[in-house]
Image (spheres, rainbow, N blue to C red):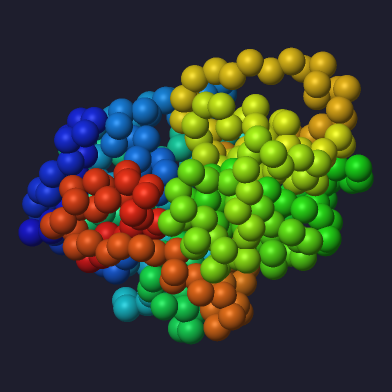
Amino acid sequence: MVQAATLIAPYQLEVREYPYPTELEPGAVLLRMLASGICGTDKHTFRGEVEQYPGSETQRGATYPLIQVGESGAFAGDGTPLEPGDRVVPAPNRACGHCGPCQRGFPYVLCDNLDSYGNALAADVAPYLWGGWSQYLYLKPRTGIFRVPDSLPDEVAVLTEIFAVTHSLERAAQVPRPSGFRPGDSVAVIGVGALGQAHAIKAQLMGAGRVFAIDPSQKRLDVAARVAGAEAADADELRNVDLVVNATGFPGSFGKAIKMVRDGGTIIEVGAFVNMGEETFNPAVLCGRHLTFLGIAGEDLLVYERTLALMARHADSIPFAEMVSHRFDVADAPAAMETALDAERSAKVLITG
């Protein structure tokens, strides 16, 4: 049997046992979980805040219960065959590959038939193991799977997905002046949980002049200072920033981002993944101040390999592992979630197999 932490309903997380899959469909992979992180989306889902991709045609909620190499083989993202024992990172989302948006090369979030591990795939359907808070994870054929460089430890490799979301900064770098992001620009990150810290680190690596961190948690500000050299700042006082990354996911932060960005500047919104309510905004400000907004709904499969390479290249100079504050076994998943919800004492919380 396989132990897996299962979210039965909002605020009801328990450890259950499921049968070990003895047969895999062609192209599927059974992954033994070494480490799986608790991310912001997991916290929203735990609280029942499950209306995702609001305002889009793919808007949807989650279906409970959730758990957060077959015949003919399976392949890594670089096209090479996977072998038993390979250490890998799977993408948490699986686009169908054949709908209109997929055929046009759009991001997975726009897929008409999207599967999301640990989120939209309920654990009441065999083979049940659809989430990462389990000793084993069943990966459907055509899931993005990427080999981890030997030099990258598990506790750093587990951060790959959130670092893959920082392709947002690469997109900003392609926006022409006066907007965009160039070496020497100032960057402010609102909300320095793991996602915000990843953006602060990436901004530094891309040559930011100064990186500011805004967060009510002193613990997270301290981590951001160590891993990214970020300076703590007051959102009510900081002004004329070239680029603002809003990574909080909570109402009120968007208005603060607008106030602190300079005229002609850019705001990247990566935190509002679920519907947390509306905020009032006057579109005349967008035009009058010549602002650029980038909405980033998640990672991109195309950036996983270079993200892993980037992390491996800087593993000796950047203390990525300091982003991880706690580690729990699968059997202790309820305690792990309780810890993750307490921003004053936690940063990134891991569940290990």
State whether residue 1 appears in this view: yes
State whether residue 57 appears in this view: no
Left or right: 219, with 328 as reference point: right
Residue at point 65%, 27% (across, down): 255
Left or right: 251, with 171 as reference point: left
Left or right: 255, with 99 as reference point: right
Location of residue 81 in the rendering, given as x and y in whole percent from the top left corner: 45, 73
In-front residue for pair 213/52: 213
Location of residue 179 in the rendering, given as x and y in whole percent from the top left corner: 85, 42
Residue at point 78%, 61% (across, down): 209
Quadrant of the image for the C terminus?
bottom left
Left or right: 353, with 202 as reference point: left
Is residue 183 shown above or below 251? below
Is residue 17 shown above or below 62? below
In-front residue for pair 141/317: 317
Residue at point 62%, 43% (across, down): 234
Please tell me in which quadrant of the rendered image residue 286 appears: top right
Location of residue 177 in the rendering, given as x and y in whole percent from the top left corner: 91, 45
